[in-house]
Amino acid sequence: MAVTMENFVIKGSHPVMEKILQVAQKVASTDSTVMIQGESGTGKELIARYIHAYSRRANQPFIAVNCGAIPPDLLESEMFGHERGAFTGAVGARMGMFQLASGGTIFLDEIGEMTSTLQVKLLRVLQEREIRPVGADRTVKVDVRVVAATNRDLAMEVEKGRFREDLYYRLQVIPVLLPPLRERRSDIPVLVQHFLDKYNAKHDSRRCTIADDAMVHLWEYDWPGNVRELENLVERLVVLSEDAYVQVDHLPPNIRSFISEKKIPRPSLTEEGIDLNKAVEEFEYRLIDEALRRTKGNKQAAARLLGLKRTTLVAKLRRKGGGANQAEGYLI
Amino acid sequence: MSQNESPTSARVLIVDDDENTLEILRRWLAKEGYTTVSAADGQQCLDALAKEEFDIVLLDVMMPGVDGMQVCERMRANPEWRTIPVILLTAKDDMETRTRGMALGVSEYLTKPINKQELFSRLRAQAHTRELDRRMDRTAAAIAEMGDD
Ligand SMILES: Nc1ncnc2c1ncn2[C@@H]1O[C@H](COP(=O)(O)OP(=O)(O)O)[C@@H](O)[C@H]1O
Ligand SMILES: [Mg+2]
């Protein structure tokens, strides 16, 4: 699955992403307010731009306002504009983002950061479809499609009284919920390939590819920064790769060690010493597992490989199933 | 976002040919509030999938008869099953098996011995995406209704 517009592409193969793209496609042709929720870097702005690009407003402006990045006392005039002398420093009248977006789409990013005063004003704008610039005694009609985004759980914010319920329902007409990348790992190989292509093309002569086991490491990593973090890494790998072949050794240490850290660390003798019995038991279990693996679960053959009687192996297996290791919170 | 949500009611199909493992997993998950069904091999797993709906499949790889990878292949080929997240639980700690799992679109790969907390956090993550998936169905239905007006 891939949807291409002039200068942006949304890639994904996970079923949820397919569903989200279908929704985005369908909702684009309407004028409905869309609310996109997802962790930072999951592609909220990309979806917003996509919806705009597929709407009848495509040739009109797309204006993005980051409500979390603009100081609260400036945000109102940023959004709705101001009259001359509306406040100290307002030397001339200025148009706000809503007016600049006229006929097009306004993207209200990090909407969960908006103060309650501004939330009331925004609600009015959505209801009346008109704005009042700061210091103005008149209102101005605006024809703007609103797409909002947040990395917070807005329903929770409403519950805690930090976000107005009425505004929430106004915005929540079409909710789009983007899962973090670690919850849709099947998108990772597709995205890695996409970004390899993208940055190979950007650094013209490159033909960078990636080894299977390096890809597996990227697949298993948890990506707290989501797609943005993945994209940044792939660009760095393309730029830095000397032989145009990305291998495990080229990956950052935190990603390289991620797989092994998910498992129990290998016992080693430290300053504090270790519990020898437990370490030996664990070693034993690992060998038993290995033997069973090689013999495809045949206990008789596994016992032979380990130099044990079948009954002894079965007894050990029984112990390991309900024994000490289980109490430790491990399952073998 | 909602990684620490309250106990879930997700339905999990647990598949392992080792009786002990199956029983321990069943107990662990029941305590966490999951509804579980157990299957002792790949064929039983496919039969269970045909009979009832599940939110997540916890799948062992090495099993007699239809093995875990074959189950994955069949699930991917079935339009009704392909969206069910699969968490592979396997003793196979090698790159080939991981690469195969990745190619088959599994959701998680955990090697035995399994850390209980690790397993729970992965289960919660998949239950979360499954919930988002359902809510996107509702969004799609809402848009379809708008179109009918
Ligand atoms: N599904 C995707 N396909 C391709 N690129 C993506 C995808 N999701 C995110 N990106 C890219 O990742 C980066 C971060 O996405 P962005 O939309 O800014 O995330 P957010 O707004 O949620 O923080 C952008 O460069 C975007 O183009
Ligand atoms: Mg963003």
Image (tube, coloured by chain):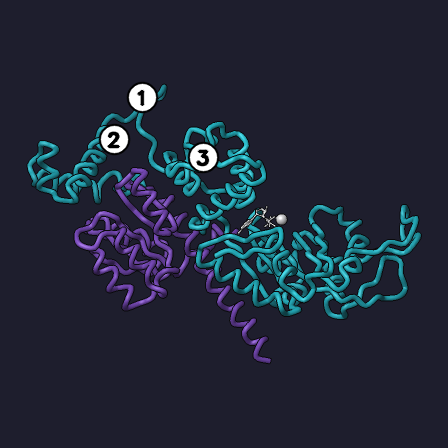
Q: Which mark is residue A269?
A: 1
Q: Can residue A165 be seen from the camera position used here?
A: no
Distance of mark 1 from mark 3, alpha carbons?
A: 26 Å
- Circle 3 sits on which residue? A255
Of labels 1 and 2, the one closer to you:
1
Q: Position of residue A127 (x, y in %)?
A: 73, 70
Mark 1 / mark 3, whichever is N-terminal: 3
Residue placed furthest toward the front = A205
Q: Secondary structure at mark 2?
A: helix
In the figure, is residue A137 to the left or right of A54? right
Q: Which mark is residue A278?
A: 2
Q: Residues within 10 Å of mark 2 (few under 14, many from 20)?
A: few
Q: Numbered disc 3: what chain?
A: A
Distance of mark 1 from mark 2, alpha carbons?
A: 13 Å
Q: Position of residue A177 (x, y in %)?
A: 54, 58
Q: Could you tell me which quadrant the C terminus of chain A lies in?
A: top left
Chain for colour purple: B
